[in-house]
Image (cartoon, rainbow, N blue to C red):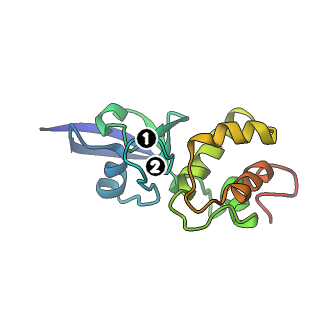
Amino acid sequence: MNQPIHLRINGADYHLEVPTNRLLVDCLRYDVGLTGTKEGCSVGVCGACTVLINGQMAASCITLAVAADGAEITTIEGLAQDGRLHPVQQAFIDYGGFQCGICTPGQIMAAKALLDVNPNPTEQEVREWMMGNLCRCTGYYKILESVVNALKPGQGAKA
């Protein structure tokens, strides 16, 4: 059975008709064509599929698309503005906070959510916040360095 839903994704409106059991990650990737969000574990524990729903982190691999009806969703594709990467995205490049790339979109989305609520976190606060995002390549040191430096003056988004 299909159900009509309305999603505002990265500032654009989408009116979709999806099966009631359609996962948000599949809706984003296959119905909308935004493939930046990755599915890692399929049970909501690895963080690879992290998106922001109304500004809050959510595991899109366990969120039904119909449950997000009417919501504002931000994916990795929605962070860059006017051709400029978000400071967190730029910091991941500048500080090597990525390896294979599977976890990177979720790591960046989690880091953005942290910096939205705490623009100057301590290293320990970053470690605690990012615990829900796993990296199989063991890039944690570079991920931590990227997040810690993302919004410091002269770091992150370099001109």
For the point 78% across and 48% down, the residue is 148
> Residue 146 shows which numbered tag?
none
Residue type marked 2: Cys
Q: CA distance from mark 1 to mark 2?
A: 8 Å
Question: Nearest the camera: 20 or 73?
Answer: 20
Crowd rating for badge 2 (residues with CA inside 10 Å; few <14, some 14–19, many 20+): many
In x, y percent, where is residue 139?
66, 60
In x, y percent, where is residue 63?
36, 37
> SS for tag 1?
loop
Q: Which residue is denoted by mark 2 in the rendering?
A: 49
> Which quadrant does the C terminus fall into?
bottom right
In the picture, measured across the screen, residue 74 lies left or right of residue 68, that is right
In the picture, measured across the screen, residue 12 lies left or right of residue 90, that is left
For the point 33% across and 31% down, the residue is 67
Rendering quarter of residue 21: top left
Measured along the vertical axis of the image, is residue 144 above or below residue 66? below
> Which quadrant does the N terminus fall into?
top left
